[in-house]
Amino acid sequence: MNKTTIRLDKYIASVTDYSRNEVKRLLKNDHVRVNGIPASNPAAHINQQEDTVAVYEQVIDAPQARYFMLNKPRETVCATEDSEHTTVLDLIDEPNLHKLHIAGRLDKDTTGLVLITDDGQWSHQVTSPRSECFKRYRVYLAQDITDDAITALKQGVQLHNEKKLTLPAHIDKIDNTTILISIQEGKYHQVKRMLAAVGNHVEHLHREAVGKIELDKELELGQYRELHHHEAALFLP
Ligand code: URA
């Protein structure tokens, strides 16, 4: 059988809460239809993309993967559970929260764009170094940024306890104490450590974009929305 087909009993069990034995009973007792025609053979193959399967006259569908963006406030942690702090998942009001995970974490005091999904392949695409996905941060600095510091950040700087220089960053100077920095790596506290390496100090960090996904300006801190199809598609195979 080719890859787009699947055994009927397996398909029903995978997209519903029925066990394989319950599914067999449903089939035997004529409660299943494929394209409107009664189906009783558990070993029959169906095409998930083309065939319509109904149980008790209700069409069943594979659950769709879910993708969200959240504007993370300060003092929330990018963890799925934390006994002390509010987690980003505490801010999401959706069913089956336990199935969701975070695609690329931010520090507790960093604000801005966090992507949340139940699609493991998708989050791997977002976070894998192979994807070379640039993340853009707005950085509020304690001291004026110097031209030398900008040159060094663009070329790569040596972080404490790291073997290699950071990969080249894109920098846009907004004013003397605000820059936009885009980096493709995601080392621990990377932006803060990069600015420390050039003798400055990050007062506040806000993530504005992950690849081509821009934080929606309509979202207040703590608010979230589903990704539009064209946004999620950016990291689909
Ligand atoms: N770099 C940091 O230092 N902190 C973050 O939260 C993200 C990038």
Image: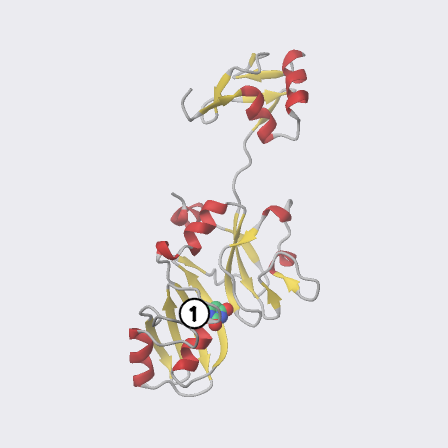
Q: Mark 1 CB in 8 Å range of ligand 1? A: yes
Kindly identify the residue that appears in the image at 67 percent across and 66 percent down: 85
Image spot of residue 129 (x, y percent): 38, 57
Image coordinates for residue 81, horizontal then vertical, percent:
65, 58
Q: Quadrant of the N terminus?
A: top left
Residue 3 shows in the view: yes
Extreme-right residue of the structure: 83
Which residue lies under the disc numbered 1?
A: 137
Callout 1: SS? strand
Left or right: residue 3 compared with residue 53: left
Q: Is residue 21 above or below residue 70?
A: above
Residue at left 66%, top 26%? 19
Horizontal relation, residue 217 to residue 132: left or right? right
Q: At 50% from the left edge and 46% from the top edge, which residue is drawn?
A: 120
39 on left or right of 152: right
Question: 69 above or below 159?
Answer: above
Which residue is rendered at x = 62% and y = 70% of the image? 75
Out of 225 and 20, give the one closest to the viewer: 20
Choose top left, top right, bottom left or bottom right for residue 150: bottom left
Question: What amino acid does circle 1 point to?
Answer: Tyr
Q: Quadrant of residue 146?
A: bottom left
